[in-house]
Image (spheres, helix red, strand yellow):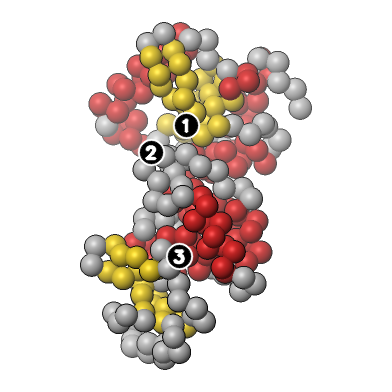
Amino acid sequence: MTETSAFSHSTAAALWGMPLPRRVERDAAVHVTVWEGKHRPRERGVVGHRARHRPVITSVGALRVVAPADAWCQLGAALGVRELVVAAEHLVGWPRPVCALDEIDSALARFGSRRGIEALRGARALVRERSASPRETLLRLDLVDAGLPEPELNGEIETPDGSTHGDLVFRRWRVIAEYDGDQHRLDDRQWATDVSRLNALAAAGWIVVRVTRHMPVRERVRAVARALNSRGWRT
């Protein structure tokens, strides 16, 4: 890798840990961007891109890589809006964000009117900070798309046992939607911690609705809506 090139696009996204759809993950090509008038690389298995302006460059280990927010923008032509939201919410997620939301905004402003900009703008309007997983992101999108109020992601909650959090917090109605992922089934220590946390929330007067990956979207929406209705929410 030279001083005028870096890993980019889906290759950079993967290096930054962004969740990508399987059709993109299956693409074995390595994406490299060059700038300052350099020629695109043409090696076998490499997809070359040429940027008019030098992108923000950083590193993952010893590898030169475009910055996470720039890599996200480069996905605009390859991913759908919801897929872009999932990728961005990983970057600004909880508890260890990869970059800040204003870095995404700055990268988006630099991206101009290039291919994919409409999808990127549509996704940016839906991006929220503090998601802990792609499943939490998709659950929030499904609930909001169905007309439910916007929840906080991993909002802090005070209980008699101290401070804790809920996955999707509808604070006004004291309702929480919890996504039960595989870690709850496979990790006994995580499972015990979550049971204690959910018991503390229930004791503090919160309704906790538990959702799994196998529940149809309609069932998830109905369960959360019923809990909200019981606390006075109306459409």
Q: Which residue does the numbered mark 1 point to in the structure image?
A: 154
| x, y percent for residue 25 | 40, 64
Q: Which residue is drawn at 54% across and 27% down?
A: 169
Q: Quadrant of residue 9?
A: bottom left
Task: Answer with mark 3 or mark 2, whichever residue precedes in sequence.
Answer: 3
Q: Residue at x 61, y 74 (%)?
A: 114
Q: Which residue does the numbered mark 3 point to in the structure image?
A: 71
The answer to the question of whether label 1 and label 2 lie on touching residues, with beta carbons closer than 8 A, is yes
Q: Distance between the residues labelled 3 and 1?
A: 26 Å
Viewer-nearest residue: 103 or 15:
103
* Residue found farthest to the left: 62
Badge 1 amino acid: Asn
Q: Which residue is drawn at 47% across and 60% down?
A: 69
- From this view, report whether residue 28 is shown above or below residue 18: below
- From this view, report whether residue 83 is shown above or below residue 134: below
Q: Which residue does the numbered mark 2 point to in the structure image?
A: 95
Badge 3 amino acid: Ala
User: Would you say residue 11 is visible in this rendering?
Assistant: no
- From this view, report whether residue 101 is shown above or below residue 158: below
From the viewer's perspective, is 80 left or right of 96?
Answer: right
Viewer-nearest residue: 19 or 117:
117
| x, y percent for residue 55 | 45, 72
The answer to the question of whether label 3 and label 2 lie on touching residues, with beta carbons closer than 8 A, is no
